[in-house]
Image: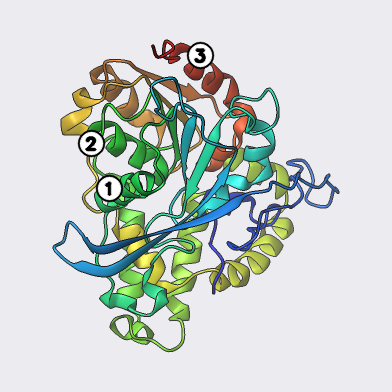
Amino acid sequence: MRLPFCFAFIAISLLLPCAAPSQTMSMPAPNPNSAASPAPQASHWDTQDGWVTLPNFQFGSGETLPELKLHYITLGAPHRNAAGHVDNAVLLLHGTGGDAHSLMNPVFSNVLFIPGAPLDITKYFLILPDGIGHGQSSKPSDGLHAHFPAYDYDDMVRSQRMMLDAMHVDHLRLILGTSMGCMQSFVWGETYPGFMDALMPLACLPVQIAGRNRLWRDLTMDAIRNDPQWMKGDYTGEPMAALRTVAGMLLIAGSAPIQMQITLPTRDAADEFLQKYMPRQMETLDANDFLYQVNASRDYDPSPNLEKIKAPLLHINSADDFINPPELGIAEREIKRVKNGRFILLPASDQTHGHGTHTWAAVWQQYLAQLLDASKSPPAN
């Protein structure tokens, strides 16, 4: 099994390695000022694994999978109010190419899950699923290769809702999503508007993927499809030329200019980083899995239905995000259509990390606390 390529941390991958999807993540937190500085070990989180199998799952494409297997991990325990409804469940959604353990990263979990923190696991029941095509959930590399159904974000959100039904979770206190999970948060809010108390999408835009964001995705998908070694998905060895293109594009798309200048201040440092980055990044990639993961965004476009979102929604992007550049002004324009919506643009600084700022919770945790406080429901009778 290949490891997830941890798209959110491309720009600092030399400092912050990914963990195997079958493990609870425990690794050093990076020091942004020095790649060589030692760092304290992260806390060990006692996650619980779970699986749900959805029989004869029909995708929006019309294709059907006899068994769609969904993996998830949890922290904390569910609580039911006087009316018998779960009132403390939080759904945490990872980004493209990640998995549930991506958000067990210490820069996220050690900030948000500890006692007294916004998502204190003694108070909240945290649910972190592997999306379709990711982690230990059903994906092309399990055996179907390019014959796997062409899933999209609507399929992923619908399967997540079915997973929660199987878990007997009938309400969510919060949905927080990063990158791809950010986009899925908007889909959740429109598709199941009464199912959650609050939404916090981080690092995306609530419109169809176009412009530069679509172009870099097209370049990676075309590199795979046009590589003779891909063999229409039935390869026996990875198409390495294609994966080199993919790895390079991911490096640029996930880049954080200020952090890179700090950690790679000389030409030699940058060259050395790239020499180490490329082979390691390519080892984490599966061509079919990646192709499907990126292609899943093809018909994403929540913009026609933003008025359907009822729950308070706090949308956060960072100004150094290559994928969602602030100069477009899209987030500021579209948030006006969300009845209880608010948008915050984090200024670029030595504390932000480009697109990956969505996982550096110390930068935005105060806004999460405000959202949770503002969206408290009155006690049930």
Q: Tell me the element at label 3.
A: helix
Q: Are marks 1 and 3 in contact (CB under 8 Å)?
A: no
Q: Quadrant of residue 350?
A: top right
Which residue appears farthest toward the right when viewing the image? Answer: 38
Residue 354 seen in the current view: no
Callout 3 crowding tier (Cα within 10 Å): few <14, some 14–19, many ≥20: few
Q: Amino acid at mark 1?
A: Arg
Q: Amino acid at mark 3?
A: Asp
Q: Are marks 2 and 1 in contact (CB under 8 Å)?
A: yes
Sooner in the amino-acid sequence: mark 2 or mark 1: 1
Front-most of residues 288 and 89: 89
Front-most of residues 327 and 344: 344
Residue occupying the point 59% across, 29% down: 119
Marks 2 and 1, how far apart at CA: 9 Å
Q: How is the image coloured?
A: rainbow
Residue occupying the point 28% across, 72% down: 148
- The residue labelled by disc 3 is 373
Residue occupying the point 38% across, 86% down: 235
Callout 1 crowding tier (Cα within 10 Å): few <14, some 14–19, many ≥20: some
Marks 1 and 3, how far apart at CA: 28 Å
Residue occupying the point 59% across, 68% down: 278
Q: Amino acid at mark 2?
A: Thr
Sooner in the amino-acid sequence: mark 2 or mark 3: 2
Q: Tell me the element at label 2.
A: helix
Residue 248 pos. (x, y %): 50, 63
- The residue labelled by disc 2 is 191
Residue 44 pos. (x, y %): 74, 48
Q: Decide: is 199 above or below 277.
A: above
